[in-house]
Amino acid sequence: MSRVVTFGEIMMRLASPLGERFEQTKNFEVVYGGAEANVAVAIAKYGGKSRFVSKVSADQFGDAAIGNIGVHGVDTNYVLKDIGRLGKYFYEYGYSQRPSKVIYDRDNSVFANSKPGDFDWEEVFSDATWFHFTGITPALSDGLIETCEVALREAKKRGITVSCDLNYRSRLWSKEKARKVMTSLMNNIDVLFANEEDSESVFGIKAEGTNVSDGRLSVEGYRDVATKLRDTFDLKAVAISLRESINANFNKWSAALLTGGEFIVSTKYDINIIDRVGGGDAFAAGLIFGLDNSWEPLKSLEFGVAASCLKHTIKGDFNIVSRDEVEKLLGGNASGRVVR
């Protein structure tokens, strides 16, 4: 069976209860997550084999982070421990016209202080067929930029498919640095994931007829974006998630995939949202799961979008759904009736 390896930071998430602002709450709900960890968990839940590579604090919080991902079947043997702090972030749920908010507390975390020699990529990639990371990882430190460069070279040397989700975070680095670093890393990337804003923020490639602030998207505009990305970086595939944000708890959700010269658009779902964090990661995981198992592009795309649709209904970062549940949604079972 194929093996997907992901590399990134897992953090403690502290969320105020729904409807409470940060300054109101007396209690924070604790879960663990992070973009690459979310992908590893989702693939394991879909029935695939995944391995998460990271570094956590050598304390009970680090143990909890490892335990929370390992319980879902992810291989955590290459999650290192070191003296220092585990990264954290605080989350305030949005509702209706009030957006969600995130405050990071991850500066100088043990993962951010990683260096290229910390990870044995020969062992990590011993049985791997796919390697996935996001733009968040190199944004955390110059040491992680170098580490990503090493990991990508080692993956490509072994013929492993490499994917990246741009995941631009303005609070982690500037557009200028993101463009410089990500342009360099693109030399070893096969499959690129982006949302309706990332391609413009990182590479200056904008979809015409789109305004993310009012939820207006142009699918034809994103066909042009995907084509420009593919041609600029010689990519095998470009996947773009298409979120139409009506308000904080109601979105229209779909995605598009450019591969083999064909531009495919998925089914569109109307989603009443419980928690949108990790929605893009669930999509990436579903598409990777399909492509890595040699599914047809349309089947892989539809699986990823349906899986992500379900993730929006689950609290926490992880997509705790099975392949069977995703396939039932794909089969038209979308009524939400009680299963007895």
Image (tube, rainbow, N blue to C red):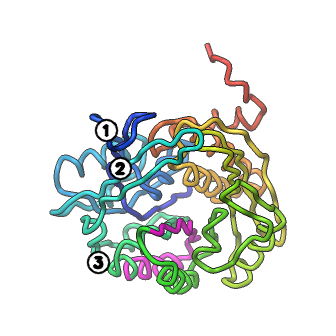
Q: Amino acid at mark 3?
A: Lys
Which of pointers 3 and 1 lies earlier in the amino acid sequence?
1
- Furthest-top residue in view? 340
Which element type, helix, strand or loop, lies under badge 3? loop
Query: Residue at coordinates 62% horizontally, 52% vertically from top-left?
Result: 283
Q: Position of residue 22 (x, y in %)?
A: 35, 44
Which range is magenta? 146-170
Q: Amino acid at mark 2?
A: Phe
Give the image quarter of residue 122. bottom left
What's the mark number on residue 115? 3
Side of 3 relative to 338 (left or right): left
In three-dimensional space, the C-alpha distance between marks 3 and 1, rounded to whole angstroms, equals: 32 Å
Which-is-in-front pick, marks 2 and 3?
Answer: 2
Tell me if residue 151 is in the magenta stretch: yes
Which-is-in-front pick, marks 3 and 1?
Answer: 1
Q: How would you rate the neighbour count of disc 3 (Cα within 10 Å): few for under 14, some for 14-19, many for 20 or more?
A: some
Q: Is residue 19 above or below residue 79?
A: above
Query: Residue at coordinates 64% horizontally, 80% vertically from top-left?
Result: 204
Which element type, helix, strand or loop, lies under badge 2? strand
Question: What is the total number of numbered labels drawn onto the structure image?
Answer: 3
The C terminus, quarter of image? top right
- Would you say the residues marked 1 and 2 are in contact, meaning their CB atoms lie under 8 Å apart? yes
